[in-house]
Amino acid sequence: MMKKLLLSIGLLTAITTANAQSFKEQIAAHRQKYKDDFLAEQRSPLKAEDLPNLRFFDADSTYSIVAKVELLQDQPVIKLTTFNGSSQEYVRFAKLTFTLKGKQLHLTLFKSLSLTAIPQYKDYLFLPFTDQTNAAESYPGGRYIDINATDIKNGALAIDFNKAYNPYCAYSDGYRCPVPPMENKLGIRVEAGEKAFAGEKKH
């Protein structure tokens, strides 16, 4: 009996370790592509010599959650202020409810009007947020997560805060990056995703 119990514990530990390793590998691959995209993007604020200054929290699967999705209908067009003082037009697409670190939280998912007209971006959704790591470990202006509308299944959406990234405005002036609205201010520390840029901001 004891031998079977020890064997079960051993198998469970091995599976848990393998899953954790697999998750870390997935996030590492995601971050490598994220870095590669800076070099491939023509309007990128970063060059190859800047990439070592990108910093990230350790991969943590507890920040990969599933949110309940409430789709919003007949929403008015709103203007999200950008860091350079201009604005961009969005509509509120859905209300997200989820539990993270033992707290029930809410975020609003937005849809860009300008991107809707571009075929390859017609399903693109925008999730900007701030949290209590801002101005300490992470960028003071908040972070973003990209969402695809096709990922919403049966009223639920998987969200991985390990994939949260900084707006281009974190690295350089000259970009129109939306400021996360107050309704997307999280009252917890989100120790996942990209940290503040360690290099000097370009002007």
Image (cartoon, rainbow, N blue to C red):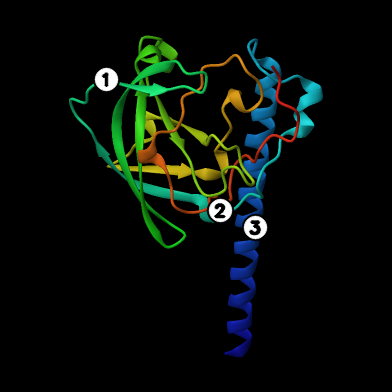
Q: Are marks 3 and 2 in contact (CB under 8 Å)?
A: no
Disc on res. 40 = none
Report the residue that reaches farthest toward the front. 85
The residue tagged with tag 1: helix, strand or loop?
Answer: loop
In the image shown, does 49 or 157 lie closer to the viewer? 49
User: Where is residue 17, by image quadrant?
Assistant: bottom right
Give residue 77's position: percent from left, percent from top.
Answer: 27, 20
Nearest the camera: 111 or 17?
111
Closer to the camera: disc 2 or disc 1? 1
> Which residue type carries mark 1?
Val
What is the spatial separation of the Cα atoms under label 2 and label 1, in whole angstroms? 35 Å
Q: Earlier in the sequence, mark 2 or mark 1?
A: 2
- Under mark 2, the amino acid is Ser
Residue located farthest toward the left when viewing the structure as drawn:
74
Task: Estimate the x, y position of residue 200 in percent, counting from the top left.
Answer: 75, 28
Q: Which numbered disc covers residue 61?
A: 2
- Which SS class for mark 3? helix
**Which residue is found at the position 21% from the left and 26% from the top?**
75
Q: Which residue is mark 3?
A: 18
